Image: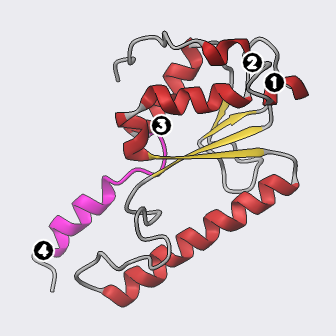
Amino acid sequence: MDCMTKAQRSRIMARIRSKDTKAEVLLRKTLWHLGFRYRKNYRKLPGTPDIALTRQKIAIFVDGDFWHARNYRKQPGDGIASHKKYWRQKLARNVERDKEVNDALTQEGWLVLRFWDSEVQKKLEGCVESVMEFASPHAPGTKASRTKASCPSAKRTNLPKKPTI
C-alpha cells in the first residue's frame, strides 16, 4: 500500500524529468567546454539520444539508475517493495528497449555510449575520457578519431572544473 496520498504521489511523479537532468546537463556542459558540438535529445535517431555527436556518429545516453534497472539488469524490479508486478514489467521493458535502441543505432553506423546518472555525477572525468577515447573535437567525423591512439585530447587529464548548474 502506498504511504502517500494521490496528490502527494502525483506531485512527486510529475517532477521526474526525462530530459535535462542534472547529470545530463553536467556532461553536456563539460563536452561543450572541451570543444565538442552536439545535438541534444536528437529525435532523428532511434531512442532520441540525450547527446548526439553527429559529426563523429556517437550517440550518448545518460540513464537513470532506477528507470533503467541498474544492478538489476537480469531481474528488473527485484528491489521494489510494492506493486512488484507493475514495476517488473515496466523496468524489464525499459531494459529491453535499451537493447533494441543500441542495435538500431549500431546498424545505422552509430557508436552508442551509455552512462549511469550517478556515474556521471560522481566520476565525470572518467565519463568524459570515455567520450574522448572515441571522438576528438579537432578531427570530427574521421575514422582515425575512433581510436584511442589517434585522439590527441584523450591523453589530456586536466578537464575544466565542473560547470555550475
Q: Are marks 2 and 1 in contact (CB under 8 Å)?
A: yes
Looking at the picture, how far across and down is residue 34, in whole percent?
59, 13
| Amino acid type shown at disc 3 | Glu
Q: Give the labeled residue for mark 4.
A: 5
Q: Give the labeled residue for mark 2.
A: 151
Q: Are marks 4 and 3 in contact (CB under 8 Å)?
A: no
Identify the magenta region: 6-20
Query: Mark 3 and mark 2: span between their CA atoms?
Result: 24 Å
| Amino acid type shown at disc 2 | Cys
Q: Nearer the viewer, mark 4 or mark 1?
A: 1
Please tell me which residue lies in front, 123 or 49.
Answer: 123
Q: Are marks 4 and 1 in contact (CB under 8 Å)?
A: no
| Amino acid type shown at disc 4 | Thr
Q: Give the labeled residue for mark 3.
A: 24
In screen coordinates, is 12 left or right of 86?
left
Local SS, label 1: helix
Looking at the picture, how far across and down is residue 31, in whole percent?
57, 22
Local SS, label 3: helix
Q: Check residue 161 in the rendering and tell me which mark sits there, or answer none.
A: none
Please tell me which residue lies in front, 70 or 38.
Answer: 70
Residue at image x 39%, y 85%?
86
Magenta stretch: helix, strand or loop mostly: helix
Query: Mark 4 and mark 1: span between their CA atoms?
Result: 53 Å
Residue 55 seen by the camera: no
Q: Give the labeled residue for mark 1.
A: 145
Please rate how many residues cluster around mark 3, counting C-alpha atoms within 10 Å: few if below 14, some from 14 to 19, many from 20. Answer: many
Local SS, label 2: loop
> Does 74 lie within the magenta span?
no
